[in-house]
Image (cartoon, grey):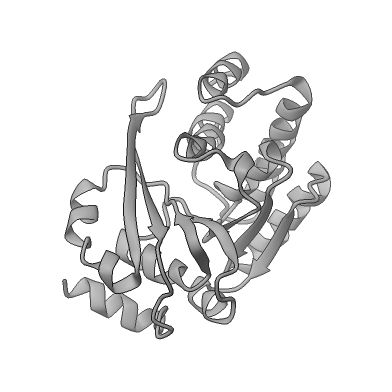
Amino acid sequence: MNKEDFINECKKINIEIDEEIYLKFDKYYNLLVEWNKRFNMTTITEKKDVFLLHFYDSLCLSKSVDLNNYENLCDFGTGAGFPGLVLAIIFNKLNVTLIESNNKKCVFLNEVIKELKLYNVEVINDRMEIYSKKNTEKFDLITCRAVTSIPIILELSINSLRINGLIIPLKSKCDDEIKQYSYLEKELNIKLIDIISYNLPINNAIRTIPVYKKVGKNNLKYPRNYNIILKNYKNK
């Protein structure tokens, strides 16, 4: 995905990329490649691939919701900042919390935030199940990308999500997974309100965005210890 492709494809999803914003993404890319020489940030390093598979792919969350209408967003397991840091560049009035358990990646994220002069982002070095347990009903939106399975995403997120808030993970094909764990809607007091399916431009990769709404208070036993969570859903 070259510069022209990036700008044109973003425009199709109602995101305007002017020269100032593009230069921020360009600097983000250069920092990613530089840090990747020392630490394992990503296996995708070609510029055209980073712009398609990391930057544009992250921005596709806006297919599911108008981020201009929300106050805060949490992205857990953010890694090198996908999708949360990418979204923060575009939606500068959205308060973004990035949760990442790897300390070196947190240092990288803070470096990007400093270099890009982003004032709407906070980095938390923690595991989501621990953070979520301590921060009840804090966020309007919770997202993640290529982190784990649907049931684990839902359980990790539910306690930190406000009532009427949304859990919106960015996934590849996951229709079967959504159906298999539909019983969690009742258990976690959430409702699947939408599924957006589409293909990325250029490589035609399949993408799915399920949208879950929290419709009432959750049982405070969630999220459980991560080892218990893993064992529970592995046996289903």
Please determine whether, in this image, residue 177 is positioned above or below residue 226: above
Question: Residue at 56% across / 57% down in the picture?
Answer: 140
Q: Quadrant of the C terminus?
A: bottom left
Q: Is residue 149 visible?
A: no
* Count of labels in the image: 0
Residue 110 % position (x, y): 75, 57
Quadrant assignment, res 229: bottom left
Please determine whether, in this image, residue 68 is positioned above or below residue 49: below
**Is 230 on the left or on the right of 182, as rendered?**
right
Question: Residue at 61% across / 48% down in the picture?
Answer: 70
**Is 55 on the left or on the right of 211, as rendered?**
right
Quadrant assignment, res 123: bottom right
Q: Is residue 228 visible?
A: yes
Q: Which is nearer the eye, 217 or 42?
A: 217
Residue 167 % position (x, y): 44, 56
Question: Residue at 64% across / 70% down in the picture?
Answer: 125
Residue 144 % position (x, y): 48, 54
Please determine whether, in this image, residue 233 is positioned above or below residue 56: below
Q: Which is nearer the eye, 19 or 115?
A: 19
**Is 117 on the left or on the right of 44, as rendered?**
right
Residue 63 % position (x, y): 46, 34
**Is 151 on the left or on the right of 165, as rendered?**
left
